[in-house]
Amino acid sequence: MAQQHGKVDRRTLLKMMGAAGASATVVSACGTPFDGSVRAAGLTGAEFDKTIPLATAGPGGNKNWQPGDTLKFLPPENIPTSGTTSDRMAALPTETQLKLYEQMVASRKWESTMKDLFLSGEDRLYGLFHTYVGEEAMAVGVIGALNEDDYIASTHRGHGHLIAKGGDLNKMSAEIFFKESGYNKGYGGSMHITDMSKGIMGMNGIVGASYYMVAGAALRAKVRGTQQVGVAFFGDGAAASPYYFSAIRSCANLNVPVIFVNENNFQYMSNPVANTAPTKYISEYTKGLDIPHYLVDGNDVTAVRAVTEDAVAHARAGNGPSMIEGITYRWYDHSGFAGGKVGQDGAFGIPYRTDDEVRAWISRDPITRFKRWLLEQGVATETELGEIDAATQAAVDASVEFARQGKVPDPESGVLNTHAAGAAAATQFYNRKGIATT
Ligand SMILES: Cc1ncc(C[n+]2csc(CCOP(=O)(O)OP(=O)(O)O)c2C)c(N)n1
């Protein structure tokens, strides 16, 4: 395995880091193409004055990463499931198969519609919006294998998770429009949408927050013997969080029924996964724990579904956690719509990736692939799937209209939903005025 090391004197290095922030100076001083690559061997007092090796090639070879390299990471065909994943999908009732298709389409159409509205300026939308377009097979494949009362904790990129778990499109749209009729009464925006009635513990602006939220819910389920399981979604960047290691180890220790689902889209904002992962795959991080690990094509809903069924069975049987890594790709920029256009799929001209790579991933579209599968299996005809597409778009359009008609929250209600004392005071205020606060 190629390891190339540049050398820099430690005292100089610390001075540089203190003066100007580590990454930029280390990169410029050492000529290494990536920041964050300081593997500081021997940083003890006794070794002061020794030189520090700066790794430019990680154990997984990732440090040699170039834009466009994601296609070299397509996952293995052989997934440890009983039977082929296609056969297992085929064994499901037609109604279920079509539901999965509909949910993937709903996620795609809802986000694409929002993207067009943001870009056209028609509704003067604002706030952060992280698209999940391209990754839909992950949410639908995983969540479809859960029961209604199982828990999920999502990420900042979680609209697809919400839709797959039965989230209400009207309330989602209204929240994006910051209206009182939204999921968070117009206070939260995209990243705080939560629906505990459906086991949705929320999207979350805190990267790496899903692990302990779900672990807590799943531990409660275990103690009560309810058979519920929890799923913690997280990105490749979030896998660098110490909370990840801590939570997955604790769940393994205590046999907590959590499925850790990594959506590896190779992009940690504008950082390639090479900068954050020392191994080729995220699922290699925790191989030492004696729990099942699955590495799947995250754009193949049959594969994602099959391994999740196994992981759920493992958890419900009292055997504790497991880990799933799905290899996928987001078609748009990290947040917002730079490089995107109204009516166009995908964002182009983004500096940290190549347009060819984006096109290659669009050609691996999880929805087109599943549609092909449904047609080949004779589950539905082109016309029937077209009807699902049209009905879904109509529901999305209706949700936008619902959002437009909604009311902007009163400024006075700003103290609600903020902190405990404020909420109590505001509730009294509303009670006096005879206004319902729930
Ligand atoms: C604790 C915390 N640190 C940093 C951020 C800023 N941030 C928002 S999204 C993001 C990248 C997350 O990347 P990844 O986990 O790979 O998920 P992806 O965006 O690719 O879906 C970062 C660093 C944050 N929101 N929370």
Image (cartoon, rainbow, N blue to C red):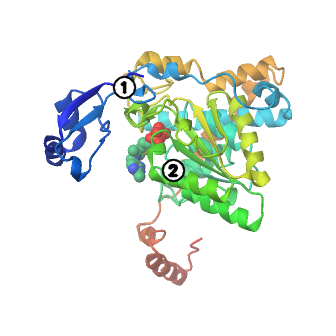
Q: Residues within 10 Å of mark 2 (few under 14, many from 20)?
A: many
Q: Is residue 179 left or right of residue 94?
A: left
Mark 2 vs mark 1, CA separation in Å: 29 Å
Give the structural element (helix, strand or loop) at label 2: helix
Q: Is residue 346 left or right of residue 146?
A: left
Disc marking residue 350: 1
Q: Quadrant of residue 367?
A: top right
Q: Amino acid at mark 2?
A: Tyr
Residue designated by label 2: 244
Disc marking residue 121: none
Residue 381 screen position, x and y as percent: 80, 20
Residue at image location 80% in from the left, 37% down from the top: 96
Image quadrant of ligand 1 equals top left
The residue lying toward the viewer, choosing from 281 and 162, is 281
Residue at image location 81% in from the left, 28% down from the top: 83
Q: Quadrant of the N terminus?
A: top left
Residue at image location 60% in from the left, 23% down from the top: 365
Q: Residues within 10 Å of mark 1 (few under 14, many from 20)?
A: some
Q: Quadrant of the C terminus?
A: bottom right
Residue 218 screen position, x and y as percent: 67, 59
Q: Amino acid at mark 1?
A: Ile
Mark with earlier residue (2, 1): 2
| Residue 194 in sight in this render | no
Q: Is residue 298 above or below residue 50?
A: above
Residue 81 screen position, x and y as percent: 76, 32
Residue 57 screen position, x and y as percent: 36, 27
State if disc 1 and disc 2 touch (CB < 8 Å).
no
Q: Select label 2 or label 1 by which is in front.
A: 2
| Residue 133 in sight in this render | yes
Q: Is residue 326 left or right of residue 27?
A: right
Q: Is residue 390 above or below residue 435?
A: above
